């Protein structure tokens, strides 16, 4: 009860800022407005022959064309008010009848208002994207056609070298007459969220950021509450042709599970990456990510599996999304070592090739219950991009996974099932995304 009251008081404090700043807003005499329209159509064709998890000999490749269709309006006035409203339809070609009684479902992707009380302070309320740093913990997930959004209040501060945000969310499945029970399986994946983030640029070559995030969950069976805390940050270095990033996060509190009692969490992750630009056309990066995990078929008193939560895993752990995006792979953790080569021969054409080696960080066991090799496999990703014109871009890619035997164990593939020797994924997409100025009297 006390925690709920504290959250309500925090929410009231956010809204009180609006009232206290009303006088400051009315004092702005300059009348400048701007209204922009954003249109995006992004069809994407895919051939999935082992995406997310190894495909079996008895299975055929999946082939389809999906599409994101978005329409967004963005308004600003006097540099003290900004608003955004965007809707989207996520569909697969052919999934609607040719003659149908109801149209394809339209969802609300963004609906927010941002008030600027001064040059330093602002408050953003509503459905919005939460994207921080390299999107390892909180990201937009733009690769996914639906994207990721949150219903939240965000207090922002920016001055000189410092940027800071304080976020708050309290979710319900519907309007309530009594009680506050929340089922995260049908709505947002958490009941409540509070976080603090800030970034400080020490000088033009060195910066660091810190994040403290608390998530509240409610069990569907006994309605018990649990909280998970994630704390850590990044160091960014960029000087001439050389760049480096260091990352560390710790997770504590309780893990959330609807099938078993929540356990105390003691998990962590660390990552390091080095970049080097040889020239304008060619660059490379090498790095390694280590995320702690549980041992297979064990019943520990605490959870040691690190959950990357709501980041954009597609950009980190291989394009075929075998880890975290598709499943927690038995919660055994991951050690991903990689190297990327980037080539940009012209201003319009870009290409990248990446190699990943994957290992489990928790102990693995085979079908007989004996210790198994931690090596899970290797992946090669090739991606291409070509700017046809300012608002139209063609992208595509080819990925291949070379699984080791232990991949069967973490993916729970039956011993009698035969895995195809060839695991790959092919995709091609056209992105139409014009930005249109509808009104401006600046």
Image: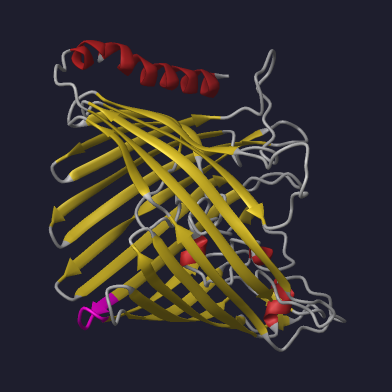
Q: In the figure, 44 relative to 165: above or below? A: below
User: Which residue appears at 56% of the width and 79% of the height?
Assistant: 399
Label tally = 0
Q: Which of 347 and 441 is in front in this view?
A: 441
Q: Which of 83 and 269 is in front in this view?
A: 83
Going by the picture, which residue comes out furthest to the front?
99
Bounds of the magenta span? Answer: 275-281
Q: What is the x, y in percent for residue 12?
A: 42, 16
The reply, left or right, for residue 162 in relation to residue 327 is: left
Q: What is the x, y in percent for residue 367?
A: 81, 79
Q: Which of 15 and 336 is in front in this view?
A: 15
Q: In the figure, 180 relative to 442: above or below? A: above
Task: Indicate the quadrant containing the C terminus: top left, top right, bottom left or bottom right.
Answer: top left
Q: Does the magenta stretch include residue 278?
A: yes
Quarter-of-image position of residue 182: top right
The reply, left or right, for residue 217 in relation to residue 210 is: right
Q: In the figure, 58 relative to 33: above or below? A: below
Q: What is the x, y in percent for residue 436?
A: 34, 44
Q: In the figure, 395 relative to 328: above or below? A: below
Quarter-of-image position of residue 136: bottom left
User: Which residue appears at 36% of the width and 76% of the height?
Assistant: 350
């Amino acid at each position: 009860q006390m925690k709920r009251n504290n959250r309500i008081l925090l929410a009231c404090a956010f809204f009180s800022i609006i009232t206290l700043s009303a006088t400051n807003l009315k004092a702005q005499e300059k009348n400048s407005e701007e209204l922009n329209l954003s249109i995006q159509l992004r069809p994407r064709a895919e051939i999935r022959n082992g995406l997310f998890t190894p495909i079996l000999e008895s299975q055929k490749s999946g082939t389809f064309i999906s599409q994101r269709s978005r329409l967004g309006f963005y308004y600003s006035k006097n540099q003290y008010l900004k608003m955004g409203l965007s809707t989207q339809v996520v569909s697969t070609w052919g999934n609607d009848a040719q003659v149908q009684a109801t149209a394809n479902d339209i969802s609300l992707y963004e609906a927010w208002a941002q008030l600027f009380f001064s040059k330093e302070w602002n408050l953003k309320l509503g459905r919005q994207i939460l994207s921080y740093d390299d999107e390892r913990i909180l990201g937009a997930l733009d690769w996914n056609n639906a994207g990721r959004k949150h219903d939240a209040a965000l207090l922002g501060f920016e001055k000189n070298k410092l940027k800071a945000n304080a976020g708050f969310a309290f979710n319900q499945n519907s309007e309530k007459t009594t009680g506050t029970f929340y089922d995260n399986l049908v709505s947002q994946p958490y009941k409540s969220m509070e976080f603090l983030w800030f970034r400080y640029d020490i000088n033009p070559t060195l910066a660091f950021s810190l994040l403290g995030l608390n998530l509240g969950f409610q069990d569907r069976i006994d309605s018990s509450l649990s909280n998970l805390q994630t704390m850590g940050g990044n160091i960014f270095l960029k000087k001439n042709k050389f760049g480096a990033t260091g990352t560390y996060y710790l997770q504590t509190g309780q893990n959330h599970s609807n099938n078993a009692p929540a356990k105390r969490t003691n998990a962590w992750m660390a990552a390091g990456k080095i970049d080097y630009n040889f020239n304008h056309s060619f660059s490379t990066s090498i790095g390694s990510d280590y995320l702690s995990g549980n041992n297979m078929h064990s019943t520990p008193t605490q959870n040691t599996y690190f959950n990357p939560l709501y980041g954009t895993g597609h950009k980190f752990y291989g394009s075929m999304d075998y880890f975290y995006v598709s499943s927690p792979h038995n919660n055994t953790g991951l050690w991903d070592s990689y190297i990327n080569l980037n080539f940009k021969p012209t201003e319009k054409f870009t290409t990248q090739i990446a190699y990943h080696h994957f290992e489990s960080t928790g102990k693995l066991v085979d079908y007989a219950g004996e210790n198994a090799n931690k090596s899970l496999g290797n992946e090669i990703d090739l991606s291409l991009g070509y700017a046809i014109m300012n608002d139209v871009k063609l992208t595509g890619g080819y990925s291949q996974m070379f699984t080791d035997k232990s991949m069967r164990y973490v993916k729970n593939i039956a011993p009698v099932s035969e895995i195809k020797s060839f695991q790959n994924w092919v995709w091609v997409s056209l992105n139409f995304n014009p930005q249109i100025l509808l009104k401006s009297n600046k």
